[in-house]
Image: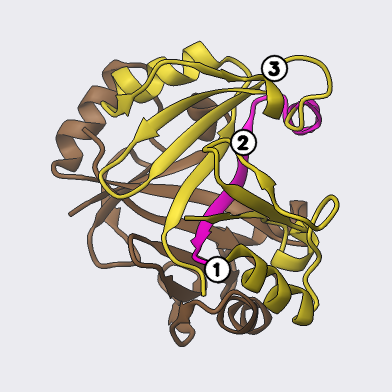
Chain colours: A brown, B yellow
Amino acid sequence: MIGRLNHVALVVPDLARAAARYRDALGAEVGPPVELPEHGVRVVFVTLPNTKVELLEPLGEGSPVAGFLEKNPSGGMHHVCYEVEDLGAARDRLVAAGARVLGSGEPRIGAHGKPVLFLHPKDFDGTLVELEQV
Amino acid sequence: MIGRLNHVALVVPDLARAAARYRDALGAEVGPPVELPEHGVRVVFVTLPNTKVELLEPLGEGSPVAGFLEKNPSGGMHHVCYEVEDLGAARDRLVAAGARVLGSGEPRIGAHGKPVLFLHPKDFDGTLVELEQV
């Protein structure tokens, strides 16, 4: 069911500094910061040959990553995103297997303009899993 | 400098259960458990079309992931591994940029039989970064 790893998301306390490290120290292809106020994050996309790393910092009030940064002031690994062809079918299969979908349980439009769902980290051994329909 | 994302590593408290979830609930291609006593882990490789997810549990005394599991009993995201062509050159560039290499600072042979280094998570915003020469 799951396809490609769309991205790994890392929450960082200082996006400009993290982006500079990926560009200068790791020599990666690093895009400009992009504000996604509807998602409460500012993001820098690091483009690797086979996938993306997303560096995230909180943006505005009630950012979904603010709490993570409070618990992990140095930052850390936040979630993985797997691609699926049919998000509704994926959800039904996961719910039947006992996994919990976060929020309303209905897909919403994610940071890439495509439908996404998040699965409860307790059902995946402490890892927050995003599914994105591609 | 960095190339492909070779893998994302997730530490789990129960490898068989985690592997079953990836196979049955997420419908991924999941390999058999492999014991790597020289690395202190038992690992299941999840093969995605563009990269791998490695599910890890501690194996034997002094496992490098045992402490992580003590701090995170439910498991969690452990590290990312980026590929590089020349690990010595990568190390020199990173050290010049102020990043710290864990251990002796010299490459050792990793779980895939190739030279690897780990970078200090404090220098990468709380994310443990492995570099593997391919």
Q: Earlier in the sequence, mark 2 or mark 3?
A: 3
Q: Magenta segment, which residues?
A: B66-85
Quadrant of the rendered structure where residue A113 is?
A: bottom left
Q: What amino acid is labelled 1 in the image?
A: Leu
Q: What amino acid is labelled 2 in the image?
A: Gly
Front position in the image: A2 or A102: A2
Quadrant of the rendered structure where residue B77 is?
A: top right
Q: Chain of mark 3?
A: B
Per the image, label 3 sits on a secondary structure element best described as loop
Where residue B76 is drawn, which disc sits there? 2
Q: Chain of mark 1?
A: A
Q: Nearer the viewer, mark 2 or mark 3?
A: 3
Q: What amino acid is labelled 3 in the image?
A: Leu
Q: Which residue is denoted by mark 3 in the rendering?
A: B59
Q: Quadrant of the C terminus of chain A?
A: bottom left
Q: Residues within 10 Å of mark 3 (few under 14, many from 20)?
A: some
Disc 1, disc 2: CB below 8 Å? no
Where residue B4 is drawn, which disc sits there? none
Front position in the image: B52 or B89: B89
Which residue shows up at 80% across the image and 77% down it?
B98
Q: Nearer the viewer, mark 1 or mark 3?
A: 3
Which residue shows up at 56% across the image and 51% down it?
B80
Where residue A56 is drawn, which disc sits there? 1
Q: Nearer the viewer, mark 1 or mark 2?
A: 2
Q: Position of residue B65 (x, y in %)?
A: 73, 31
Which residue shows up at 81% across the image and 58% down it?
B105
Per the image, label 1 sits on a secondary structure element best described as strand
Disc 1, disc 3: CB below 8 Å? no
